[in-house]
Image (cartoon, rainbow, N blue to C red):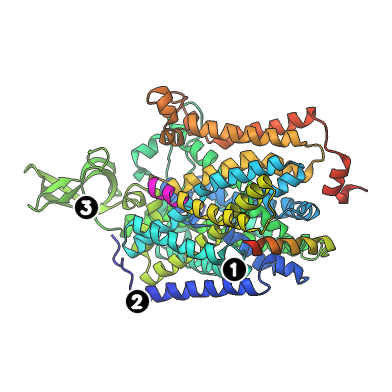
Amino acid sequence: MSPHTTVDLVDTLVILIYLGAIGYLGWLGWKGTRTASDFLLAGRGAHPVVMAISYGATFISTSAIVGFGGVAGMFGMSLLWLTFLNIAVGIFVAFVVLGEPTRRIGHHLGAHTFPELLGLRYQSKGIQVFAGALLFLFMPLYIAAVMTGGAVFAASQFGIDFEVALLIFSLLTAAYVIPGGLKAVMYTDTLQGVIMIFGMAFLLWFTYDSLGGVGDAHRALTDMADLVPKPLADIGHRGWTAMPAFGWGAKSYDLWWTVVTSIMIGVGIGVLAQPQLIVRFMTVRSRRELDRAVPAGALFILLMVGTPYVVGSLSNVWFARNGPLLSGRVVQTLDAGRGHALVELVRENDAGRWQAVLDGKTGKPVKAPLVVSARQPAVDADGHPFERVSGRSIALVYGKGQADQIMPAYITSALPHWFGLLFFLTLLSAAMSTLSSQFHTLGTAAGRDLWEQLTGKPGGSQPSLKVIRLAILAGLLVSVALAYTVRDEYVIARFTAIFFGLCAATFMPAYIGGLFSRRITRAGAVASMVVGLAASLFWLLFMKAKEAGALGLVKWLTGGHSSLVEDLPNWPVVDAIVVALPLSILTAILVSAVTRPPDAAHLARCFPERRA
Amino acid sequence: MLGIDDPMIWLAYVACLVATALCVAYGLVRRNRAGDELTQEDRAWAVVDRQVEDEL
């Protein structure tokens, strides 16, 4: 499909220069005043724009750009509600409501990791160990999502196998995070953020410009609603510029529940409980710095997430106008006036006859919606004459049925080769800035929160450092194994949503309650964390069909069903967070209400400002 | 509106822009309102944090 899928000398040079620049900034980070703590020690804060971009670059990864961008290509612009949540919740609420209390309480108690913040707030080593263990065990899911996003694009851009791209991406990651990328060097994150800004700004401009402007591009997408594939239309897809059908009690509402509960709530709200983002607030100088960072943070997120969701959706228009020509036999005319038809795809064999393209999994002919541009007589494989139509289809068809392939297919097909390279650097930047924080969280969880708490060995000692290195290596290997093994549909977005949902249900009541409430107790926090995690895992293992079916335990127990509620409509697609988070909140409130309040001296340490 | 018929979608589109504009306005209005003191506690925290970072 792609006209330019090779790695030439210029590509190699540009990538090496980029890696050299990142390596140089990382090296400077080791030597001088470059991390947020260094800035604090120097008596000043990092510039708010630097802080905001650094935060944004950690927040946004290949998962958002490739994974969720691809989901937008499949489900449409309803994902813009996630962009709204990312700005309103992920930036405004996080910076304005949670940022300062987190910074203050973290400094009062001397916390340096998220599990440590919870542990010190509730005077419980058990909470710190529990949170550290959870992060150590589940962070690889999110890491795998980020690595898959990068590898999928590299495979498409450079015409290499996914497995090779994943291996290269893993080695790059190891080379980045093991020697020094773990140190959160503000300038490295900022350089990566700036590259991301250029990449996404051009992508947005190019897409709108090539489709005739904002209004025309959207109108063209609106007019393609009848091209939605039947399996998606059956679950409520009503076009790429329409919300899925809303209701309860029928399969035709499944998409609404998928989009709203998994994607919007899971990720949009779940971001508030992301440990690698929360610890960033502790490195901020003051409330004023947080306030000043809000505008840059919001603009950055608007561009970084708004662009892929809009572009992913609009890629359908681009492919329908300019994608490679496909041939087929008409099965159903969708709109005669516009030449929209559902066809069974055919391809020419060596004998010059046209045979059906078969689905690799089902063995059945592949059907695709087509914007017909030509009709010609042809002969099928059995020698029967038929009318062969040719034309172009929607993004999902060019992504070979996988949402994760849509953005790579669009970039390599639609944009100039130099942009593919810039976009690769954009993705590399997005991936590396997020990966460094993920491995930082994973490493400190294993070393500071698990090993040091369980053994009583001091930080910085040889055993502790070995544990951190081993944990990072193990995390990398598990992540690569996950990315290698699970290649299905929109796995990048799903892995991300699972991790965000787990963190939200497990940590959010204890974290937010701990920041604002003097009444929440240790028992309340422990109970809410256990209930949040247990409910999430139960839902993933037994209720949510996609995850439970893939994990297999429920199939084994029920003799083949992918969910305990398989026969009930909508329940199998509802995300765990919708059930687990309310349960976790309720547990925190109820258990705190019936247990002894924390002692006054400890509360005075946590909230010295409130003493008066 | 904007070539989009479903009000829930163009509302989302506009809401993204409005939310960003409000964030920008908030940052400008609050630019110098909040305190900006660096306390001894903040410095002590940063010293330990640098040690934690260096250990990694």
Specify the segment rendered in magenta. A479-487
Q: Chain of mark 2?
A: A
- Helix, strand or loop for disc 1: helix
Mark 3 and mark 1: Cα distance apart in space? 47 Å
- Helix, strand or loop for disc 2: helix
Q: Chain of mark 1?
A: A
The reply to whether label 2 and label 3 mark residues of one chain is yes
Judged by its main secondary structure, the magenta piece is helix
The residue tagged 3 is: A390
Q: Is residue A303 left or right of residue A609?
A: left
Q: The disc labelled 2 sits on which kind of residue?
A: Leu
The residue tagged 1 is: A190
x then y, percent, for residue A231: 36, 37
- Helix, strand or loop for disc 3: strand
Mark 2 and mark 3: Cα distance apart in space? 37 Å
**Height in image: A86 above or below A8?**
above
Q: The disc labelled 1 sits on which kind of residue?
A: Thr
Q: Chain of mark 3?
A: A
Q: The disc labelled 3 sits on which kind of residue?
A: Ser
Of residues A521 and A363, the one drawn nearer to the viewer in this rendering: A521
Instruction: Write down the quadrant of residue A227 in the picture.
Output: top left
x 82%, y 62%: residue: B33
